[in-house]
Image (spheres, grey):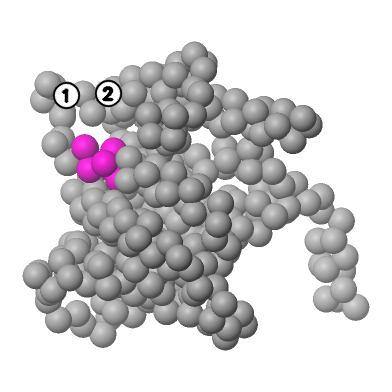
Amino acid sequence: MARARPVALAARIPAPVVAALLMVAAMFLAALSNAITRYLSQEMPPLELAFFRNLFGLLFLLPILLRTGLAPLRTRRHGLYFVRGLVTTTQMAFWVYSLQLLPVDKAIALNFTVPLWATLGAALILREAVGLRRWGAVAVGVIGSLVILRPGFASYEPASILPILTAAGMAAVLLIIKDLARTESPISVVLYMGIYTAPISLLPALLVWQAPTLWQISVTAVMGVLTVSAHFMMTRSLALADASAMAPYDFFRLPFGALIGFLWFGELMDGPSWFGAFVILAGTAYLTRLEGRAAKARARS
């Protein structure tokens, strides 16, 4: 009877609330995974750390094949999968270097430019129509990035360009996934990410290889569990609510990253950087709102 009460209470929670809670929890796990990456990057070569992230990601994905069989592996688009694996591996290496050289919250703030880069790529590469308001949101995000970067000032850090390159790589991956989704199943897209990124990231890792300790491998495995758990929670959240409604919760990565960075590494982001971060968030939030409205308009037509 005591167990039935919490279950009954949970059943009465509206689905949008459950979706929001799952998304916030996913963002906390993602921020924690980033902090662990920063911690390990002080002891392990970033390229080797990126390989282990990909390897454990693949190992946690393989059980999918036990349920589905080999059907998800049938594809004629290995070329695009390879390009995606190459881009994913490159942007992941940039991200690990970002977390090694920059405060966690600053790297996360600059990484929020992904939707802005995706909009730019959709216009220039996919030839999608991008209206004036979307270009305005991109311009606002660029201004916010410049506030954080402060090029030409004494506070400028050259390493700050790394999370922006990471964001550009992530945007490119999103565009590739959008193209793959036309012919490939979601399971195939997820599986081939690990199948290609693990061996591709192994090659550069071998150039800087240092024998990892059992502790480092264990912590990397924990990082893999956190990442997979975050993706699972995000997937479940998006199954319960619209993507446009859940997208703003991605911004929780910044306060979570700032809190963990302060408690773990004693890092504090300065005032101008916070201002630039919120300018980026404003542009991204507005862009997300526009995309949500456009999606609803397409659904009604």
- Is residue 171 in the magenta section? no
The answer to whether the residue labelled 1 contacts the one labelled 2, judged by CB atoms less than 8 Å apart, is yes
Q: Which residues are magenta?
A: 160-166
Observer-nearest residue: 226 or 66?
A: 66
Image coords of residue 251 (percent x, y): 50, 39
Residue pictured at 39% horizontal, 42% vertical: 171
Asked if the magenta segment contains residue 165, the reply would be: yes
- How packed mark 2 is, by other alpha carbons closer than 10 Å (few <14, some 14-19, many 20 or more), is some
Q: Position of residue 27 (x, y in %)?
A: 51, 52
Marks 1 and 2, how far apart at CA: 7 Å
Residue at (70, 32) in percent of width and height: 298
Mark linked to residue 146: 2
Relative to 103, 75 lies left or right: right
Q: Which mark is residue 151?
A: 1
Left or right: where 283 falls relative to 276: right
> In the figure, 257 relative to 298: above or below?
below
Residue type at numbered disc 1? Pro
Earlier-in-chain disc, 1 versus 2: 2
In what quadrant of the picture does the N terminus appear? bottom right
Residue shown at the point (66%, 59%) measured from the top left: 236
